[in-house]
Amino acid sequence: MNSNKPKDEYLIPLKLEWESGPLVAESISYPQPEQIKVGNDTLSVFTGSFALSTVFKAAKDASAGAKSLTGKLRYQACNDQMCFRPSSLIIHLPVVVQ
């Protein structure tokens, strides 16, 4: 999968975004990418299993209780020969505001 900072502008970066809700995303951390050779190009990618992490802060108007956050993960997967069409994944994250 392309990293969050691919080397070429035509490649789609991995990007996690959270909708506004009971929690506000303060920061999103991506792992250290690997540099791999694909044909004549070197790509900045994440391989195998990896984790993204988000630091959240309660919104000023958030009420206590069980809530849900919605996010969107946009990515472009690649193999050792080519990159595939970009795709998106909707994420639903249950949270408890205290």
Image (cartoon, rainbow, N blue to C red):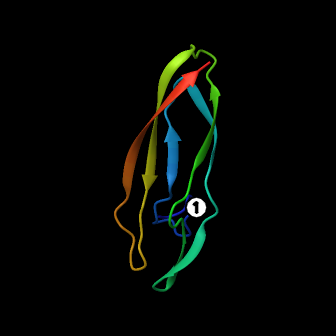
Quarter of the image for residue 57 reads top right
> Which element carries disc 1, helix, strand or loop?
loop
On screen, residue 75 versus residue 96, left or right, reads: left
Q: Reply above or below: 53 against 61.
A: below
Q: Quadrant of the C terminus?
A: top right
In front: 85, or 64?
64
On screen, residue 40 versus residue 59, left or right, reads: left
Q: Reply above or below: 32 against 67.
A: below
Residue flagged by tag 1: what amino acid is it?
Lys
Q: What residue is drawn where x is 58% and y is 21%? A: 97
Residue 44 at what x, y percent from top left?
A: 56, 70
Residue 4 at what x, y percent from top left?
A: 56, 58
Q: What residue is drawn where x is 37% and y is 59%? A: 86
Residue 79 at what x, y percent from top left?
A: 41, 73
Quarter of the image for residue 56 reads top right
Residue 28 at what x, y percent from top left?
A: 61, 45
Q: Reply above or below: 63 against 90.
A: above
Q: Residues within 10 Å of mark 1 (few under 14, many from 20)?
A: some
Q: Which residue has dot 1 on it?
A: 5
In front: 43, or 80?
80
Q: What residue is drawn where x is 52% and y is 69%? A: 8
Q: What residue is drawn where x is 59% and y is 71%? A: 34
